[in-house]
Image (cartoon, grey):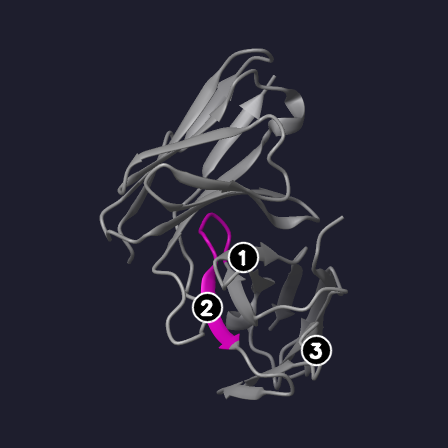
Amino acid sequence: DAGITQSPRHKVTETGTPVTLRCHQTENHRYMYWYRQDPGHGLRLIHYSYGVKDTDKGEVSDGYSVSRSKTEDFLLTLESATSSQTSVYFCAISTGPRERLAGELFFGEGSRLTVL
Amino acid sequence: TQLLEQSPQFLSIQEGENLTVYCNSSSVFSSLQWYRQEPGEGPVLLVTVVTGGEVKKLKRLTFQFGDARKDSSLHITAAQPGDTGLYLCAGAQGNFNKFYFGSGTKLNVKP
């Protein structure tokens, strides 16, 4: 199994409070991603990182910010959580493309966030 | 609106039947991947297709990438209960680094 750890695995919070989810990898992979998964929507890309301090927005980035100060850690922050952000959040890592072939994504076990 | 649309969204079949799952987009992708996800776990890669028209076989699973690299299909022959799970297609854009997923197909194979 790829060395990816997400924390916390479960969290219940109230609307308006800040929340930070952490993704830690031991694989030294360059690329890291945050996705959210909701019924009927598959996985939707929130933000991704292609190196330390290098990040880019995904499909559903509004209301989320990220930071990557070290290769191994990628943080997802909800500055002021809303009920619409209740979801399961997955972190993924990838080596990146090799010989024009897209790299494989390795996923963490997910973090279930409930915003009341 | 997601870049990739999958159909059907749900599929419940008997063991031994064949099935096809479709993944469609109006965008062109550098490559298309298929993942399988079981409850409580993250998705796991099944296959990557890169060339338009490419067909790849993985035991009872056959994957095809459309000629225009906008769509893909997954065909399972003689489905087994162990095939039960959520199947997701994913397209890579932006120099292969950005992965967008489809809405998913939840497959249930009954014994």
On residue B20, the disc is 3
Q: In which quarter of the image is the C terminus of chain A?
A: top right
Dot 2 surroundings within 10 Å: few (below 14), some, or many (20 or more)?
A: many
Disc 2/disc 3 C-alpha distance (Å): 24 Å
Q: Position of residue A86 (x, y in %)?
A: 60, 29
Query: In terms of image quadrants, where is residue B73?
Result: bottom right
Tell me which residue sits at (39%, 76%) in the image.
Answer: A99
Q: Is mark 3 on a helix, strand or loop?
A: strand
Which residue position is annotated with label 2? A102
Q: Quadrant of the N terminus of chain A?
A: bottom left
Disc 3/disc 1 C-alpha distance (Å): 23 Å
Q: What element carries label 1?
A: strand
Q: Are marks 1 and 2 in contact (CB under 8 Å)?
A: yes
Q: Where is residue B33 in the image (x, y as percent from the top left)?
A: 54, 69
Q: Does the magenta stretch include residue B47?
A: yes
Tell me which residue sits at (50%, 38%) in the image.
Answer: A89
Which residue position is annotated with label 1? B99
Residue range in magenta is B38-48
Indicate the amino acid at tag 1. Answer: Phe
Tell me which residue sits at (29%, 56%) in the image.
Answer: A2
Q: Do the residues labelled 3 and 1 touch (CB within 8 Å)?
A: no
* Camera-nearest label, 3 or 1: 1
Indicate the amino acid at tag 3. Answer: Thr
Tell me which residue sits at (52%, 64%) in the image.
Answer: B36
Q: Position of residue B20 (x, y in %)?
A: 70, 78
Q: Where is residue B15 in the image (x, y as percent from the top left)?
A: 62, 78
